[in-house]
Amino acid sequence: MTLRFVLDTSIFVNPEIRKDFGDNPTEAMKTFLGYAEKLFGKVEFYMPPGIYREVMHFVDEELKPEIELYIIKKPPNLHDLKIPAFVVYELIDDIRRRVDKGLRVAEKAVRESVVETDNVDKIIQKLRRNYRKALREGIVDSKEDFELILLAKELDATIVSADVGILTWAQKMGIKWIDASAFKDVLEGLVEKLGGKNL
Amino acid sequence: MTLRFVLDTSIFVNPEIRKDFGDNPTEAMKTFLGYAEKLFGKVEFYMPPGIYREVMHFVDEELKPEIELYIIKKPPNLHDLKIPAFVVYELIDDIRRRVDKGLRVAEKAVRESVVETDNVDKIIQKLRRNYRKALREGIVDSKEDFELILLAKELDATIVSADVGILTWAQKMGIKWIDASAFKDVLEGLVEKLGGKNL
């Protein structure tokens, strides 16, 4: 059986995670491709189109031929896959609470700005931060994230991500996962076990 | 084959729709129950628990025994039903756009309130209106709405609603629907065709 991983942007972009692989996204990708080369034919690495685009935004174009060889680009099959109703039910309920909270955050900012009229830029910065926290943190809030989850489901693959929203959904939907922060160790281990040359 | 309808609150509560049935929710319910009585055994009427609670909030308790007889309360089977992935994909994308728009609405309100510091209550009212419009109009944004859709799917029943968000999802999910504004005429017609006494 071929092992399959679906890769999230966080591995190459999130500084906390990426530092295991390299000093910048391009270096991180190079390190990853080194493992992928050794595991070729034994482990498959996938990215859905949205995640691929995000990653390529940060990674040097010159790595493209190798990336095309070692990372399989595939969209999930949106028209055949199905989501358990209770997962969507919980999503809708979660969003509703967040929307209500977002309004409270906005109202608070308006009331603050009346008192501190010369601090408006600071208040808007705080509003953006709090609004983002209320509406977007810890939730699958983009097509890109959702594609990642669906692709892993479709392929019965393991999601590699550091995103709380993605990992939460992965668990609800019975999808295997590895926290991105553990990924380098897993790759090292796989190279050892599956008979690639030692690094 | 028994005809089945899943009823939304709008029939009894939304003034525009309700007026066909009566001057207030209780009167509207009485009129509806008149039809339901004549159609008993031929047509089934359902409500999911959340919608039932909403409706009972507006309808006189004394109608409860009749309501229990003619309106079947049933939750959807959240653990067996599945939603096509593309519907959820579109929902997530729609919400993302709305969340971004909500922030713009909030920032605008903050900037206005700096200029018109004595109009803060008016600005907050406008903020609420615009925020609601941005985040909630035309979308399935509550568990109650979602239960309605799922129950209709499960029962292969017809949704009766005036809510744009619900009707949009009903169409995406291949669910039969009647606009609530046409419901009284449909009931009249059914009583005529299915051999109930004329009203």
Image (cartoon, coloured by chain):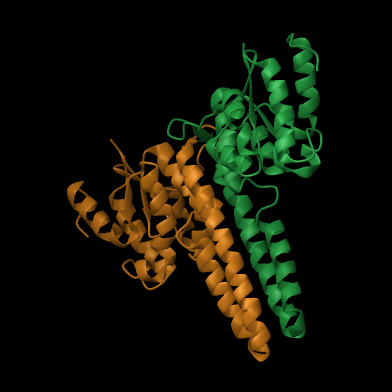
Chain colours: A green, B orange
- Given residues B5 and A63, the one toward you in this image is A63
Q: Examine the image and state in which quarter residue B24 appears.
A: bottom left
Q: Position of residue A110 (x, y in %)?
A: 68, 77
Horizontally, residue A52 falls left or right of residue B51, namely right
* Residue B52 appears in the picture as rendered: yes
Tell me which residue sits at (72%, 75%) in the image: A121
Query: Does residue A22 sit above or below A110 in this rendering?
Result: above
Q: Position of residue B3 (x, y in %)?
A: 30, 42
From this viewpoint, which residue is outermost toward the bottom? B118
Horizontally, residue A196 falls left or right of residue B157, namely right
From this viewpoint, which residue is outermost toward the top? A195
- Given residues A91 and B16, the one toward you in this image is A91
What quarter of the picture does the C terminus of chain B occupy? bottom left
* Residue B7 appears in the picture as rendered: no
Q: Position of residue A193 (x, y in %)?
A: 77, 11
Tell me which residue sits at (61%, 40%) in the image: A56
Query: Does residue B163 sit above or below A88 in this rendering?
Result: below
Tell me which residue sits at (73%, 68%) in the image: A125
How many tags in the picture?
Answer: 0
Q: Examine the image and state in which quarter residue A143 appears.
A: top right
Horizontally, residue B7 falls left or right of residue A32, namely left
What quarter of the picture does the N terminus of chain B occupy? top left
- Given residues A107 and B81, the one toward you in this image is A107
Query: Does residue A120 sit above or below A96 in this rendering?
Result: below
Q: Position of residue A195 (x, y in %)?
A: 74, 8
